[in-house]
Structure formats: structure tokens, C-alpha cells
């Protein structure tokens, strides 16, 4: 869907694709739209916003937290620019806590864009999860992501930590 939208779009487009196989978290009703998030899970306690390869981990984290009685919204942010300001502001005002999850440096990516929206509105708290500002080392993709805490368990732990600060 992203490729078809890029072909139809007038102007430059950059699509970042991972090399690994990603788990499918979408339904047939989910559609790609520039600048629009897709709601994958309802929830009012916190929000996880992710994109790309780590969407599966985000959804699994929400499922883990649901077993603990925590209702966590999951938004798939298909585009960082343009970003869905409305969905971010709604999540910030309704849940108060946002964890962003991306297979990208924590500088200048999805988390930074979400932080800008939240800071300008003055509502909510954001934790950025991604590749920290250091050399990651060597290993398989799964190993390196686990080293950065970018697993369902790691994301769930960050959501729990944010919720404990209420």
C-alpha cells in the first residue's frame, strides 16, 4: 500500500524498508494514508506509537499489559513527515503517557517528531525507545534489538515505568 501511495503522490517520497521479515499486525480494513496513523489497539491507560518492523513488538507489548489489566492504545504511524498531529494530541490528552518505539536512532526520528507535537501542546509525557546514541555492536538484528530493549517485554517495561510516575 505504501508503494502504491508513493507512486500516486506528486513530489518526492522516501520509504524506509527493513531487510527482515516482519510479522503482520494489520487487518484488511487497515489502509495506508500519508499523514494518518492507524489505530491497532484501543486503550486509555497509555499509548504506544510505533512504525515499521517494530509494530509487532508494540502490539505484543500491549497484549502483555492487557493481561495485567492495563489498556494500552497502539498507533501505527505510517509516516513521520507528515505526522498525524491529531492522533498524537488525542493520545496525549486521553492517555497522558506515550511510548514511541522505532528501529531507528532516538535522535531525529519518530520519537523526536512525537515529542515536538506533545511539547508544543504542553500535554502528556513521552518516552522514546529506539537505538540509543552509540555504536550498537555486531550481531543478528534480533540480538541487537534485544540489546536496546526493543522487544515486547522491554516496551511493556517502559509503559509500566511511565504509568508508575502518575
Image (cartoon, rainbow, N blue to C red):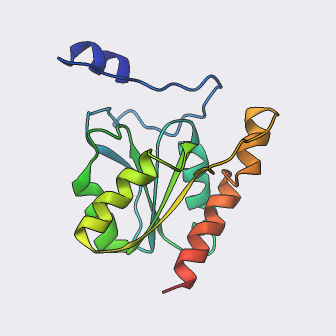
Q: Decide which of 129, 35 is in the foreground and name it.
A: 129
Residue 139, given in percent of the width and then of the height, sits at 82, 34
Tell me: residue 147, above or below residue 18. Answer: below
Q: Is residue 40 visible?
A: no
- Which residue is at the front of the view, 99 or 137? 137
Residue at coordinates 32% horizontally, 46% vertically from top-left?
A: 37
Is residue 16 toward the left or the right of residue 119 in the image?
right
Residue situated furthest left in the rendering: 10
Q: Residue furthest front?
A: 134
Q: Nearer the viewer, residue 10 or 138?
A: 138
The residue under the point 27% across, 74% down is: 122
* Outermost residue toward the top in this view: 7
Q: Quadrant of residue 152?
A: bottom right
Image quarter of residue 36: top left
Does 35 sit left or right of 53 as displayed? left
Residue at (29, 73) in percent of width and height: 93
Camera-side residue of 69 and 154: 154
Direction from residue 121 to residue 124 in the image, left or right: right
Amino acid at each position: 500500500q505504501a508503494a502504491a501511495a508513493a507512486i500516486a503522490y506528486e513530489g518526492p517520497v522516501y520509504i524506509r524498508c527493513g531487510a527482515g521479515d516482519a510479522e503482520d499486525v494489520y487487518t484488511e480494513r487497515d489502509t495506508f494514508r500519508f499523514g494518518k496513523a492507524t489505530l491497532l489497539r484501543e486503550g486509555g491507560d497509555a499509548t504506544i506509537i510505533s512504525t515499521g518492523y517494530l509494530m509487532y513488538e508494540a502490539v505484543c507489548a500491549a497484549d502483555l499489559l492487557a493481561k495485567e489489566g492495563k489498556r494500552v492504545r497502539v498507533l501505527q504511524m505510517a509516516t513521520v513527515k507528515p505526522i498525524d498531529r491529531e492522533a498524537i494530541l488525542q493520545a496525549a490528552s486521553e492517555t497522558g503517557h506515550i511510548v514511541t518505539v522505532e528501529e531507528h536512532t532516538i535522535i531525529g526520528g519518530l520519537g523526536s517528531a512525537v515529542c515536538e507535537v506533545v511539547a508544543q501542546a504542553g500535554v502528556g509525557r513521552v518516552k522514546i525507545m529506539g537505538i540509543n546514541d552509540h555504536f550498537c555492536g555486531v550481531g543478528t538484528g534480533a540480538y541487537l534489538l534485544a540489546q536496546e530493549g526493543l522487544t515486547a517485554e522491554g516496551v511493556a517495561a517502559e509503559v509500566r515505568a511511565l504509568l508508575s510516575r502518575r
